[in-house]
Image (tube, rainbow, N blue to C red):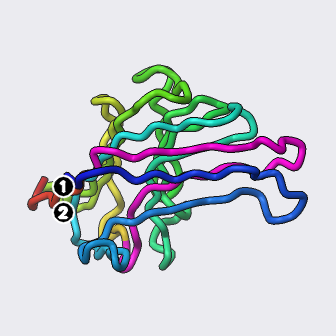
């Protein structure tokens, strides 16, 4: 587990130009934060952190959680994300290979200002196929088995992010995400 925390904030996100949203990202690193670690197909891991998302108002949308950047096109659905958000109060994983909503069936809808523990594991099954498993506050998704020979690709990066939608009608538009208890460990073969 990594000591301390990572804090990402944005304020005054109400420009008439400048795009849809502001996104701040941090990535796991194996050189004391100098460069983002570029995962390889066989880098099996289990990662987790607690996140608290706060805001000036739940709308416009703010979101925070895991981001597995698809830099090389390995994920058929683009970046893999596992997030909480302020406006729909979702706890949801989407993009990449999978989709799974934790709320409202497995966990309560997310309330801004509360702590939630998110986890993602990437591992190889005994049949040789790769798979993902997600968790929120100790509740687990199904195991998402990937097709034979499919993996995370080489060179993709895993970390956390905070995103805030731009809204010219909300001059006080602000938000904040704090990531604590950040952990990543290798997963032995087979899982």
Q: Position of residue 4 (x, y in %)?
A: 29, 51
- The residue positioned 75% from the left and 43% from the top of the image is 173
Q: Tag 2's secondary structure?
A: loop
Based on the displayed image, in which of its 4 quarters is residue 155 positioned? Answer: bottom left
Based on the displayed image, in which of its 4 quarters is residue 60 positioned? Answer: top right
Q: Position of residue 55 (x, y in %)?
A: 63, 36
Q: Are marks 2 and 1 in contact (CB under 8 Å)?
A: yes
Residue behind mark 2: 128
Q: Is residue 48 magenta?
A: no
Query: How far apart, in angstroms, are the residues tagged by discs 2 and 1?
Result: 5 Å
- The residue positioned 40% from the left and 73% from the top of the image is 156
Residue behind mark 1: 125
- The residue positioned 46% from the left and 58% from the top of the image is 67
Taking depth in this image into account, of 175 and 39 the one nearest to the observer is 175
Q: Which residues are magenta?
A: 153-182
- Side of 115 where 176 appears, left or right: right
């Amino acid at each position: 587990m990594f000591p301390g925390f990572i804090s990402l904030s944005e304020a005054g996100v109400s420009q008439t130009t400048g795009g849809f949203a502001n996104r701040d990202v941090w990535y796991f690193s194996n050189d004391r934060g100098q460069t983002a670690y570029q995962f390889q197909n066989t880098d099996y891991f289990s990662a987790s952190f607690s996140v608290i998302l706060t805001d000036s108002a739940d709308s416009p949308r703010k979101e925070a959680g895991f981001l597995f950047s698809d830099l090389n096109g390995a994920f058929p659905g683009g970046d893999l994300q596992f997030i909480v958000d302020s406006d729909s109060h979702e706890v949801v994983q989407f993009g990449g290979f999978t989709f799974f909503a934790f709320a409202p069936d497995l966990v309560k809808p997310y309330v801004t200002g509360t702590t939630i523990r998110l986890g993602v594991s990437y591992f190889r099954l005994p049949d040789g196929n790769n798979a993902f498993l997600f968790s929120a506050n100790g509740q687990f998704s199904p195991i998402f088995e990937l097709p034979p020979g499919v993996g995370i690709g080489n060179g993709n990066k895993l970390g956390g992010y905070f995103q805030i939608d731009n809204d010219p009608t909300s001059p006080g538009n602000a938000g904040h995400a704090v990531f604590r208890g950040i952990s990543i460990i290798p997963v032995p073969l087979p899982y």
